[in-house]
Each structure stands twice: as structure tokens, then as C-alpha cells.
Amino acid sequence: MRHIAIAGGGLSAAQLDRLAAATFRRAGGREHNGALVPMIIRLWKDAKAVQVVPETALRSTPAALARIDGRLRIFVWETVTPDEFRFSVAHELAHAVFLHERMTFSSPDDEECAADSLALRFDHFKREWMRTTLRRAQAVNDSLAARLAAKENRDAA
Ligand SMILES: [Zn+2]
């Protein structure tokens, strides 16, 4: 995937492009060919690399990366839409790349931001869907910021 200017989490657009290209190379391809899950299965040599699970299996987050018996696996709620599924898988793959590259970030927020930016390089997402998703993410951020401010006010009182 080319021509994405979005940078995030302290990583430049060029660094994110290089990470995506290196991941595609390790998976045996030059760039995304429309099949992210088969690519991850090839990359990790694990047929169960990506698994769909009931919401009750993951607490409060629609997707997660976990190490089970020494193997990295991506778990995604069975209730997400196909677009959310693809984005969640790409986002968790980004976390796995950071682990593989032993990359550290100055804050958890920075890592989430970098994971979103790298995820955009792993798959093609519809512009309209991205706008809605980013709006929703912004709303979540706003409500978290409001709760944090309220807590700080309480702590200060
Ligand atoms: Zn994340």
C-alpha cells in the first residue's frame, strides 16, 4: 500500500511505510494483495493465528493480541462488522510488528496511534468508513478526557 501520509505515535510516515513493506516481505509478498488473514497465517506459520471469539471472551475490547503457549494470536469479537474486523486485525498485527521489532513508545496512547497508522498501511479501508471510525474514536477520546478532567478536579478538591 502506498501514498499514505499519515504518521503517528512518534513514527514518521517513512518509518511506517518501511515497517509495512518489511512485514509484507516477511510474509512473502511485496505489498497487500487483499487477503490480510491468510498473510498473517503465512507470516506466523499458524493456521489459528486469527480467531473469532464471543464478546465474553475478551473484556471490553473488540480485538486483542495475546501470546498463547508461546505463539502470538489475534482474537476478534464475532459481532464486529466486516470493516471493523479488517481494521482490528490490521491494528493488532501492527502491535505484533512493534513487538517483533522490539519498538517502545513514550506512552500507551502513542503506541495505539502508531498501531492505527500502521494498520492503514496493511489494508485498504473505505474512506467513508474511516471517517466514521475516526469520529467515533474522537468521541471516545473526548469522553475519556472529560472523565480524566473530572477525576483531576475531584483529586484536587
Ligand atoms: Zn491497540
Image: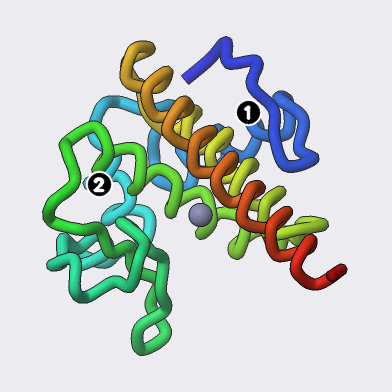
Task: Say which residue label 2 marks.
Answer: 37
Specify few, some or many for label 1: CA neighbours under 10 Å numbering under 14, 14-19, or 20 or more: many
Of 120 and 2, nearer the camera is 120
The image position of residue 14, as x and y in percent, is: 73, 25
Query: Looking at the rendering, which quadrant does residue 82 occupy?
Result: top left
Label located before the other in sequence (1 or 2)? 1
- Quadrant where the C terminus is found in the figure: bottom right
- Callout 1 secondary element: helix
Of 63 and 15, nearer the camera is 63
Evaluate whether residue 30 shows in this view: no
Q: Which mark is residue 43?
A: none
* Amino acid carrying mark 1 in the image: Asp
Q: Residue furthest front?
A: 157
Q: In the picture provided, is 141 more to the left or to the right than 105?
A: left
Evaluate whether residue 7 shows in this view: yes
Q: Where 145 sits versus 6, above or below?
A: below
Query: Looking at the rendering, which quadrant does residue 71 occupy?
Result: bottom left
For the point 28% across and 64% down, which residue is it? 75
Q: Cα distance, mark 1 to mark 2?
A: 20 Å
For the point 42% across and 33% down, which residue is it? 136
Q: How many marks?
A: 2
* Amino acid carrying mark 2 in the image: Val
Of 67 and 147, nearer the camera is 147
Q: In the picture provided, is 85 more to the left or to the right than 130?
A: left
Task: Say which residue label 1 marks.
Answer: 17
The image position of residue 1, as x and y in percent, is: 47, 20
